[in-house]
Image (cartoon, grey):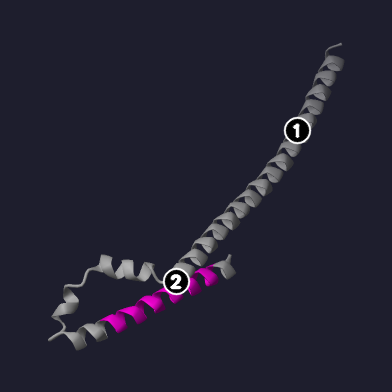
Amino acid sequence: MGDMTVKVMVEILFILAIATKEIHQNSASALILSDGPSVLAHRSPEAFLRKLVGRMDIEDALRRLDKLSQEEARMATAEGLKAAHSIDNKVEDVSAKVERVDDRVKDVGNKLIDGMQITFN
């Protein structure tokens, strides 16, 4: 699971790097074309995201991130099933031990009954 976490973090950092690069490029061009930084305050986050989503490198990174997320979910499910199987085996062991104790208690009970019958006869 640790290796998968590293892969997911690498993809997230890659996406953030591309987005940061785009922000720097857009802010530099906006500052050059305008009278001041006030133009940056009026930019739409939605427009910025639409611009990023259209880029192939972002699209590829998002696909890889989705694939990694699905793989991580499958791994987590497999770990859960493995734990459930281990618990099932332990419950079966406890059940077998309880049956052996039950048999021993019955044997002791039968011996007590036999002993009482001998005493009263």
12 versus 114 height, above or below: below
Query: Residue 72 vs residue 56: left or right?
Result: right
Query: Residue 29 vs residue 117: left or right?
Result: left
Of the pair 48 and 14, the residue shown nearer to us:
48
Cα distance between the residues tagged 2 and 1: 64 Å
Q: Which mark, residue 56? A: 2
Instruction: Residue at 81% x, 18% y: name it.
Output: 116
Of the pair 71 and 28, the residue shown nearer to us:
28
Residue 13 screen position, x and y as percent: 44, 75
Of the pair 65 and 83, the residue shown nearer to us:
65
Q: Residues within 10 Å of mark 1 (few under 14, many from 20)?
A: few
Q: Nearer the viewer, mark 2 or mark 1?
A: 2
Quadrant in which the N terminus appears: bottom right
Quarter location, residue 94: top right
Q: Amino acid at mark 1?
A: Glu
In the displayed image of the protein, which residue is found farthest to the top? 121
97 versus 29 height, above or below: above
Instruction: Residue at 87% x, 16% y: name it.
Output: 118
Of the pair 55 and 46, the residue shown nearer to us:
55
Q: Residues within 10 Å of mark 2 (few under 14, many from 20)?
A: few
Quadrant in which the C terminus appears: top right
Report helix, strand or loop for mark 1. helix
Q: Which mark, residue 99? A: 1
What is the magenta segment's predominant secondary structure? helix
Residue 98 within the magenta-colored segment of the rendering: no
First-in-chain label (2 vs 1): 2
Evaluate if marks 2 and 1 touch, with contact meaning CB atoms under 8 Å apart.
no
Q: Which residues are magenta?
A: 5-26
Q: Amino acid at mark 2?
A: Met
